[in-house]
Image (spheres, coloured by chain):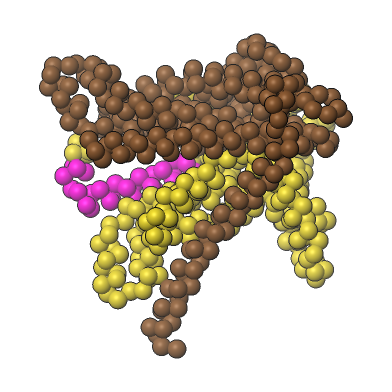
Chain colours: A yellow, B brown
Amino acid sequence: MLVAIVCGIGVVLANQSMLSVQKFGLNFWRTEIWDPVAGEFGALPFIWGTLYSSVLALLIATPIALGIAVFISELCPATLRQPLVFITELLAAIPSIVYGLWGVFVLVPAVRAVETSLPDAMRQLPLFSGPPLGLGMLSAALILAIMVIPFISSISREVLKSVPAAQREGAYALGATRFEAIRAALFYARTGIIGAVMLGFGRALGETMAVTMVIGNNPKVSMSLFAPQYTMAAVIANEFAEAAGELYLSALVEIGLVLFIITLIINSLSRLLIWSMARSETAAQEPPVAAEAGA
Amino acid sequence: MTATGRRKLLSSIFVGFCAGAVVLALVPLAFVLFFVISQGIRSVTVNFFTHMPTPVGEAGGGMANSIVGTLILSGLAALMAVPIGVVSGIYMSEYAGSRFAALVRFAADTLNGVPSIVVGLFAYVVAVLPFKQFSALAGGFALGVMMIPIIARTTEELLLLVPGTMREGALALGATRARAVFSVVLPAALPGIVTGIVLALARIAGETAPLLFTAFNNRFFSTSLTQPISSLTVQVFTYATGPYEDWHRQAWAGALVLVMIVLVCSLLARLATRRLERMHARG
């Protein structure tokens, strides 16, 4: 049943987007003009917005999430561990619409204040060009970062937990400082950690509500952190219910299909990485069990 | 500075960075909770739960229709997801070594990672398009699809926690495999599975994107399964992006109710799992 649903999603979306695929072909992904009234559909701005916001979010989130994972699994006193785990899980459990609401009324004004206070010299840079609206790429990236941190940190924590104690003890025995021992553990767990970060990337790509509410929803490709932009998930959320005309609907479904395929690939890859890490662990520690599982 | 001194300094900086990261993550959580509670508390009254929305400009009014809508949608989702999820979970744990179980597990993880908006699209094509009608059923279907993998994975993990000796004992007494699973293993894991279902419900109740074009929204009180239905989340979205002060207040109140649902469910689940763990430790 589960397998059927996953296949079903792919088939159904592919089928429904046929019209737009046939009409536009690859140009759909190369053109920048999104004008439903004129019947012109180019999805480049959405792809760009999705990738740009997710990459920015990961740049912010990864170091912080790893720091948290290391702190909880390696550094903090045992009594603090459970509450911290609970709190990070709570961060993950807050509905995205609540983050969005908070984003619109608290984060966006704050970002706008920072943007306006930037010196003029910096405003000349392409990265900071455009009017300081608050609504835009920077707010979206920040809110995405807040939302993916708990995911990345909780998986990295699991991965770090599977690093054998002998690794750390060995490092300490050689006179390593705390940082050096943990660096060794992190290096040992690198595959799993890359998997965790990619899983966070998948989440960020598909995140809808919070981003829709703060990114400004303007289909323009731009480097600027201040510019309002648009993502794939956001355009579906905003326009699908009101899309008139089969071609328009079909174009939106095609965007959904591609989003589905991208997240599918990223998730599968990251799961594989985390799995291969877990498997090599059990193989190294308890050979008999691994042999049994393989049989 | 000596080399050792430098290494020690670097180490301290690193430890400081990690602690700082934790604090940095706590800041947004504290901010979100602070704003949701302080802004929301003003509008969460008895009326909020029992009254319908009033026209803009009129004081009072609530989100009764949305609250009922969210309950109905979550109920529908559970009706669909609990049987499928639990059975898939049992399959994955019972046939843990087999190829197909690995495939099912992979499908569950994949489905879990599918963006909720894509699930919404899928539900639209399957459950809205053929009937030319947004409906509560379609919304429940979308949420159900999202809920299945969560329940399946929780069930699997909890069943694997049940000591193997219990199953072997049942089998040794001559029970068939099905009997052993349903009369011995499943009951042992049941409290945990129920907890998992509650958590999944809490997560599902907070979903917005899959409902935007399946359950749509409804300004009126509706319990009809074939009609569009309101939900807390979609209503909060509408209110938050609308231009009126009154609406924003209601949005904060709705958000507070959502956060409370999540908070209470996670706390309950946490207490329950702790008790389970203690039972395990004793047994």
Q: Quadrant of the N terminus of chain B?
A: bottom left
Q: Nearer the viewer, residue A279 or B85?
A: B85
Position of B58 with respect to A7 (left or right) is: right
At x 71%, y 51%, the residue is: A107
Q: Which of the 4 image quadrants contains residue B94?
A: top left
At x 70%, y 21%, the residue is: B50
Q: Is residue B217 visible?
A: no
Position of A109 with respect to B164 (left or right) is: right
Image vertical order of residue B17 relative to residue A151, above or below: below
Q: Which of the 4 image quadrants contains residue B229?
A: top right
Image vertical order of residue B71 relative to residue B266, above or below: above
Position of A89 with respect to A118 (left or right) is: left
Q: Is residue A188 visible?
A: yes
At x 48%, y 60%, the residue is: A67
Q: Would you say residue B218 sits in the magenta stretch?
A: no
Q: Nearer the viewer, residue B89 or B175?
A: B175
Image vertical order of residue B52 relative to residue A121, above or below: above
Q: Nearer the viewer, residue A166 or A101?
A: A101
Q: Residue furthest right?
A: B57
Q: Position of residue B30 (x, y in %)?
A: 61, 51
Looking at the rendering, the stretch of residues picked out in magenta corresponds to A266-291
Q: Residue furthest front?
A: B46
Q: Nearer the viewer, residue B1 or B62?
A: B62
Q: Quadrant of the C terminus of chain B?
A: top left
Q: Position of residue A66 (x, y in %)?
A: 47, 58
Q: Would you say residue A268 sits in the magenta stretch?
A: yes
